[in-house]
Structures are given as structure tokens and as C-alpha cells.
Image (spheres, rainbow, N blue to C red):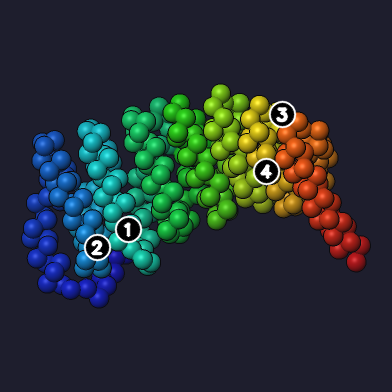
Amino acid sequence: MLTEPNIDRSFVEDQIKLLQRDINCIIDQDRNLRKQGLTKLQDFFKIKQNVLERIYIFDAYALKNLLRVFEDQVERNRETCINIVLNYLNLHDQHYNTETLRLIVDTIINRLNQLPFAETSEEIRLALIKLLHQIQVKHIEAYSNNLQRLAHMIGKALQDNFPEVKKDAAIFAAEISKKLPIGEYMGEAVKSLNQNMQHAHTKIRKATVDSIAPILLSRTNGTFLEIVLNNLRNLSLDKSSDVRKGTLIAVSELLMHFSIQNLNSYENNLILILMNSLSDDNKEISNLSMQLLDQIGLKRQKLDEEANL
């Protein structure tokens, strides 16, 4: 429910007289009128004066039609729509309208939650993932109402043929997993990540392995580790030292934070990955392996001592 803040009503009324036609035009059948309306709205929400009033105008007057522009047939219009939402986010210092952001998130999910994607432009799909990331940075509560649909969308986005979408989707998945209990629903996403661990591009393998630990640790009941364990072993031998290093850090995070039940099932397999890296040709990586093994040993010793109390 939209609540009216303490705003300058006269400013809102004056601006709506000027903007209402543009708000109507952004869903007009004429593509030129849609473009003109979007351009004017983009300029309006870019101005950081009368901020509360502009936020209110977005929530109360512009949002409904803007949500429809995410499906506009013209790629440039969809791009402008995303920029308008970014301008709206930048107007805030805090106190976001959760319902507004949830409607935006749901609209984005609908563009990315099935193959082939409803959003046909690779660049727009990338921009949508980046927008989702910005929203989670600013107001994580926008995601808490529908974690299952969000996880399904992440699983699809990770299958995108565009490498940049794969990379940013992995980063987004890791950040969401650190903040919300989404892990129970991330089975498809983990399967997609498992495929991306074999990707030809180093940056994709690196982003993927960096996301593994937060996602697996977000699941409180069991783990999806068995899906990616073989490829974790393979990445510990990757030709890229950055990927090998990222793999060791991911393995150590799992060993440091897994439940006792998961440790009992997988500790030996994970420890072996670190031990094999002691002989890495890269001195930095072999030293890192030793440091991580020492830290994990101390943690395990503490757990055993607490268990014997």
C-alpha cells in the first residue's frame, strides 16, 4: 500500500500537469511518442531536487506504465526504462518503497525466467541483471517475498549464452545467497554453475567458483556440493592461477562454515583438494594451501574440543 509522505503537494500537482501526457505516451502505439515520453521521464527523475516529491510521483503515477515498458518492442525504449529505474533508485538515501521495488523485481524476473528469454537483447539482459544487483544492494527486502521464483530465474540466467550475463548472474547469486535463505531453491542454479565451471572463458570460471561457497552455505538442509565436487577438483588444477586460488578459497569457506553433518560427509574430499594444491607450481598458491589447512585444522580442533565438553 502506497503511503503519502510529507511532501510539497503543490509541486506534485504542478509536475503532474506537465508529466501526465508523457506518462500516458510511454505506452502509446506510436513508437516515437513512447520514445519522447521516456526521454522526458528520464530527465525528470535524474534531477536531485524535491527528491521526496519525485519519488512519490514515480511510485504513484509513473510506475504502472513503466512496468509495461520493460516489454516494449523497441530495445532503446527498454534500455531507457532501466535507466529511469536507476535514476529513481539514486534519488533515495534510505526508506525505499518495498512494494514498488517488488513490482520491478517481479517484472524483471518475468523477462529472464524461461528459455528462450522473453528479453531477446543480450545487452538488455545484462542491464537487467545489473539492475537486480543494484536493488539488492539498496533494499534486500524487495526479494524476500518470492525466493523460489528468483532462484529459478537465476538458474536460467546462468545458462545465458552471453558470457557477461553468466558472470554477473553468478555474482548476483552469491550476493543474494549471503543475505537471504535462498539456498533451498538453488538446485537448478548449482547445476548451471557446474556447467559454467567448464567454460572456455577464464573470467566465467573465476566468477563461478567465487559464487559456489555462498550459494552452498545458504542451504541449511543438506548441500548441493555433490553436484559440483568433481569440477571443484578440476578447477583446483585449472590453467589460470586466479581460478586455482579462487577454488582453494571456496573450498576453505565450505570447510570453515559447513554444518557438522556436511563436514562428516565431505570433509575428506575437500581437504584432499587443499592438500593436492600444496605441490602447486605457483608458490603463492602452495603457500595459501598451507595457510588454509592450518586455519581449518584449528577450527576442527575447536569443534572437537567443544563436542567433548
Q: Earlier in the sequence, mark 1 or mark 4?
A: 1
Label 4, on which residue? 250
> What amino acid type should be assigned to the residue bearing mark 2?
Lys
In 3D space, how far apart are the residues under numbered discs 1 and 4 (Cα atoms)? Answer: 33 Å
Q: Earlier in the sequence, mark 1 or mark 3?
A: 1
Seen from this angle, which residue lies furthest right?
308
Residue 27 seen in the current view: yes
Element at label 2: loop
* Nearest to the observer: residue 167 or residue 264: 167
Q: Earlier in the sequence, mark 3 or mark 2?
A: 2
Instruction: Name the mark on residue 274.
Output: none
* Nearest to the observer: residue 279 or residue 213: 279
> What amino acid type should be assigned to the residue bearing mark 3?
Leu
Residue 53 seen in the current view: no
Q: Is residue 176 above or below residue 120?
A: below
Label 2, on which residue? 48
In 3D space, how far apart are the residues under numbered discs 1 and 3 (Cα atoms)? Answer: 43 Å
Seen from this angle, which residue lies furthest bottom?
6
* Residue 174 shown left or right of residue 239 in the figure: left
> What amino acid type should be assigned to the residue bearing mark 1?
Asn
Residue at image point 47% right, 50% down: 146
Q: Is residue 237 above or below residue 45?
A: above
Element at label 1: helix
